[in-house]
Image (cartoon, rainbow, N blue to C red):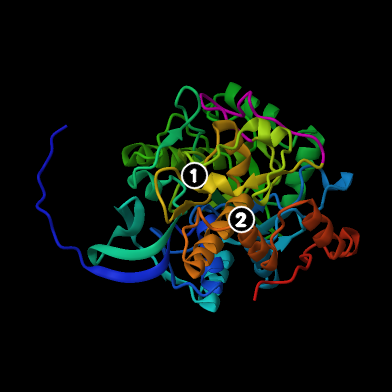
Amino acid sequence: MRTFHHPAEELPVCAEVDVLVVGGGPAGVAAAFAAARLGARTLVVEQFNCLGGVATAGGHGHICLFSSFGNPTWGTDELVVGGIPYESACRVTESGYGTFDRRNCEFEVEGMKLLLDRMAGECGAAVLYHTFFVRTLVEGGKAIGAVVQNKGGRQVILAKRIVDCSGDGDAAATAGCPFEQGNSEGQCQPVTLMFQIGGIDIERVRGYQRDENDYKLSATWKRAQEAGDMRPFQSVVMGWWWTATRPDQLGINFTHITGVDTTKAEQLTAATIEGRRQAEETVRIYRKYVPGMEHCHLLSTPPTIGLRESRRILGDYILNKEDLMAEREFSDSIGYGSFFIDIHNTKGAGMDVRTVRPHNGFKYQIPWRVQLPRAIENLTTAGRCVSLTHEALGSVRVMPQCGILGQAAGTASALSLARGCTPRALPVDELQASLRQQGCILDAADVVRVNAALPPRASLPETAPPRLPRCA
């Protein structure tokens, strides 16, 4: 590779903060709101023009799972995720932009953008949009700030604590932290470009799914491919996200692009172009093959493609599939996960053979140690870049868990500053006590306590969120 020598330059310091949050996705908003509410001067740098990450910039208007795993008709609606993720789901519903049934939150993307801006303002978390993270500044084994790039040029933000919520582990990787990427063959899960369609009749669509006795409509897509109407990029519905606040619209999780290294801009570019091709092709297929979609039309594709997997930063503990399936308990638990082990096929359409759908009521604890990267102090990770195996990531990567990881990292950042220690040295019982005060659910006693205070599901209107005390 050719190189070019760029002379050293003096970079202006554009901000000095207590806590710098790199990335404003589900993990980033929870980290920033938690740190700011605890009194830390907090700044989020975000490359797009909104908070929310995949939920907003990624066009994914569906967040789950807030409950333990299983079908609600089997009684599995016990809440296991509280804190800021729960609060956001309640508030987007109360604002008239979505619905929340204790398990899943369906919402309008534009409404969620407005809500998160409002919440940032309320708690005093500063936000800097249209700003790219470049690299972490390290001095004496400690993170001390970051280089960022925006319309003002290349600049430095000095920070006493950094929370890496970039998804790709950019802050930790550029600080020299070790990481893994992909499965045993180095392959990451496929990427998906979400899109929104209008002009649908949801009752007829649901009726067709019932008539076919197959939510995923595998036989429908097979017929379309055999007729030459559809390339074999997908074989199942990955998600049709519908909210009663926009009854004629549907969010589509269907495009599927394999073999993408999400740390390479060239590959992300090619994947995005292919995602738009698949979206346009999908609309034509839906019109021809799905009753209730005969007159559907493409409303929008989001500004970023959805990424399921990238770097996993190695921490003080690596959470694995065996931990999840054994529902192992950890003394340093910061919250629960409960999603099935959702691994999309890395070589083709549909799901990977390593996908696991666990038993009814499944839930597991996530230890704080997965957020403490090796070889660096004053930097924590949150979201899908924490210390996990490829299989464990299939469950932990979803948005409620990203949020609780973010809340733990933001809380630890603020508490460690007040105590005068590193996040790694912070007594875990202090972190856990603060998280419980913020409405988080860390162990079985919390599950019992919180769910005992909730009204029975049957007594809730369909669109009303259950209630939990909000953070002050």
Which residue lies at the image location 51% right of the left edge and 24% below the top edge? 347
Image coordinates of residue 137 in percent, x first then y, are 30, 55
In the image, residue 344 lies at what x, y percent?
58, 32
- Circle 2 SS class: helix
Classify 440 as above or below 386. below
Image coordinates of residue 173 in percent, x first then y, are 37, 44
Q: Of the two numbered discs 1 and 2 on the same chain, state the one appearing first in sequence.
A: 1
How far across and down, in percent of the image, does residue 386 sit?
A: 51, 44
55 or 144: nearer the viewer: 144
Most foreground residue, 302 or 376? 376
> Amino acid type of disc 1?
Cys
Q: On the image, numbered disc 1 is attached to which residue?
A: 385
Q: CA distance from mark 1 to mark 2?
A: 21 Å
- For the residues labelled 1 and 2, say whether their Cβ atoms are less than 8 Å apart: no
Label 1 neighbour load within 10 Å: few <14, some 14-19, many 20+? many
Q: Residue at x 44, y 51 (%)?
A: 166
Residue 273 on the magenta span: no
SS assignment at label 1: loop
456 lies left or right of 6: right
Amino acid type of the residue tagged 2 in the rendering: Val
Residue position for label 2: 428
Magenta residues (range): 342-360
* 257 horizontally vs 264: left or right: right
20 lies above or below 338:
below
On-image quarter of the N terminus? top left
